[in-house]
Amino acid sequence: MSSFNIQDLYTDPMAAAELAAADIARRTGIAKHDVALVMGSGWVSAVDALGTPAHEFDAHEVPGFFPPEVEGHSGKIRSYAIAGEHGSINALVFLGRTHLYEGKGIEPVVHSARTAVKAGCKILILTNACGGINKEYHVGQPVLIRDHISLTATSPLIGANFVDLTDLYSKRIRAIVKAEDSSLQEGVYVHWRGPTYETPAEILMMRTMGADLVGMSTVPEAIAAHALGAEVLGISLVTNAAAGVTGEKLNHEEVIAAGKAAADRMGALLKGVIPKLL
Ligand code: HPA
């Protein structure tokens, strides 16, 4: 779409999301998608469990999307037709995301979430890799996000838009997921800007505040989608013990490897849950 300039994302983000949704509808021939998934670090191969996509294209061909910068984030958008319990479900999958630490501002961070809602999605599934603050968690464990603490002092919303966040991470959907896998635990996720990992002292602060998980994504997208009326599910994969928990140093390769190792379980979980969502 040659008339779109990336600057337009910043001047009118909602119009950019509508343009992106229209572009996705044109590329896929699907006027309305039902569910969207954002696949974070290490989650990309989990999506293979959903089968062969009906469509796949580069995200940066769609208005408002930048090329990916992080290994493990492939920058593609896929569309799947999934047999649901009450009819066919069109799932829109974003392989990768933009993070706050990239320095592009908040608008690109939430563009997938807004585009998904404008494309018709009533449910947004946000996945991520995270550090385990809760000492009972182990590497490779998926945890449902029950609530969050934002430590970035940033919101995707501007103005007197006093959105209630009491049920941000939908209780209804968490119940469906726990019925699928009763071993799943729930936790409180802290959004950390990054790109540095936290210090051990910061992790101690977070634990004292009541946090279980820490990562660099998900929270702005959840808020942006919820503000537009979508239900949100957040699933974190614990890819490492948070700083200071074991004394080991943290690195991105470990995060990606833990994601790959857990991909089958994560994929099976998504495959089992999506048909029950609508
Ligand atoms: N901290 C923040 N973000 C992360 C971590 C972590 O320990 N692991 C994966 N993403």
Image (spheres, rainbow, N blue to C red):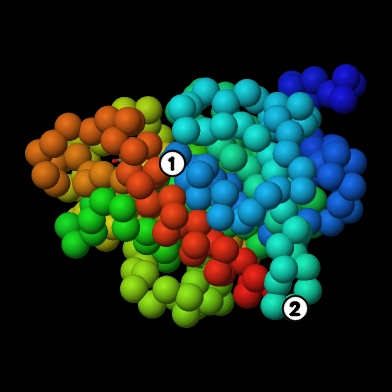
Q: Which mark is residue 133?
A: none
Q: Is residue 45 left or right of residue 55?
A: left
Q: Find residue 86 and name its label.
A: 2
Q: Quadrant of the N terminus?
A: top right
Query: Which residue lies under the disc numbered 1?
Result: 42
For the residues labelled 1 and 2, the Cα–Cα distance comes to: 31 Å
Residue 104 percent location from the top left of the image? 57, 24
On screen, 255 above or below 38? above
Q: Residue at x 74, y 22 (%)?
A: 6
Amino acid marked by disc 2? His
Quarter of image, res 33 = bottom right
Ligand 1 found in image quarter: top left
Q: Residue at x 34, y 69 (%)?
A: 185
Q: Is residue 150 left or right of residue 222?
A: left
Q: Amino acid at mark 1?
A: Gly
Few, some or many C-alpha atoms within 10 Å of disc 2 (few <14, some 14-19, many ≥20)? few
- For label 1, count other residues whose C-alpha is less than 10 Å away and answer few (under 14), some (14-19) or many (20+): many
Label 1 element class:
loop
Provide residue 181's location: percent of width, then percent of height.
Answer: 42, 73
Residue behind label 2 places its C-beta within 8 angstroms of ligand 1 = no
